[in-house]
Image (cartoon, helix red, strand yellow):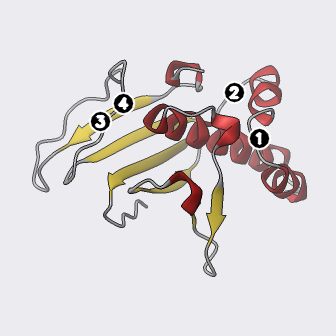
Amino acid sequence: MRVSNVCGTGYNKVTKVNADITPWQLPPPILMINSGELHLWRINLHCTRQSVAKNKLLLSNDELIRAERLLDAQKSSQFVVSRAGLRIILGQYLDTDPKQISLQINQAGKPSLADLHCSPLTFNLSHSGQWAVLAITNGIQVGVD
């Protein structure tokens, strides 16, 4: 599954902390992240019912249960789309099927890649309104809000 299959994705690569802001662009065909880089992704959370149903196929059982617990149907759909987008994008970096991405949750509830992936990638996912933003780095803890 290609990154372009996520509803309304955009990509931005930052190599300097004080870098100029650049417009969102299409991601490169092969995703690689070097030490010191920050890749920002945006995901449009407004998707059709068919897209939400398709995205559910990528989620773990725990993620599906969490989505079902959300009483607001819109919030549930946004959770599904953002987690599927996270899995698709991480799958591209790891060259792994998005469904096979294993996440672990720390005591504060923050997800990270499970140790079995043996990857230095770290990420943070945040959303507001109809957009989610995903920050990915190589070995550096990151937060995006």
* Distance between mark 2 and mark 3 Cα atoms: 22 Å
Q: CA distance from mark 4 to mark 2?
A: 24 Å
Closer to the camera: disc 3 or disc 4? Answer: 4
Q: Nearer the viewer, mark 1 or mark 4?
A: 4
Q: Amino acid at mark 4?
A: Leu
From the image, tell me which residue sits under label 3.
Answer: 12
In-front residue for pair 43/137: 137
Q: CA distance from mark 1 to mark 3?
A: 25 Å
Q: Is residue 30 visible?
A: yes
Q: Amino acid at mark 3?
A: Asn
**Mark drawn on residue 77:** 1
**Dot 2 alpha-carbon crowd within 10 angstroms: few under 14, some 14 to 19, many 20 or more:** some
Q: Which residue is mark 2?
A: 47
Find residue 117 and report its horizontal and vertical position in percent. 53, 52
The residue lying at 85 percent from left, 45 percent from top is 73
Q: Position of residue 58 (x, y in %)?
A: 74, 35
Real-space Cα distance between discs 2 and 1?
8 Å
Say which residue label 4 marks: 31
Query: Looking at the figure, which quarter contains the N terminus?
Result: top right
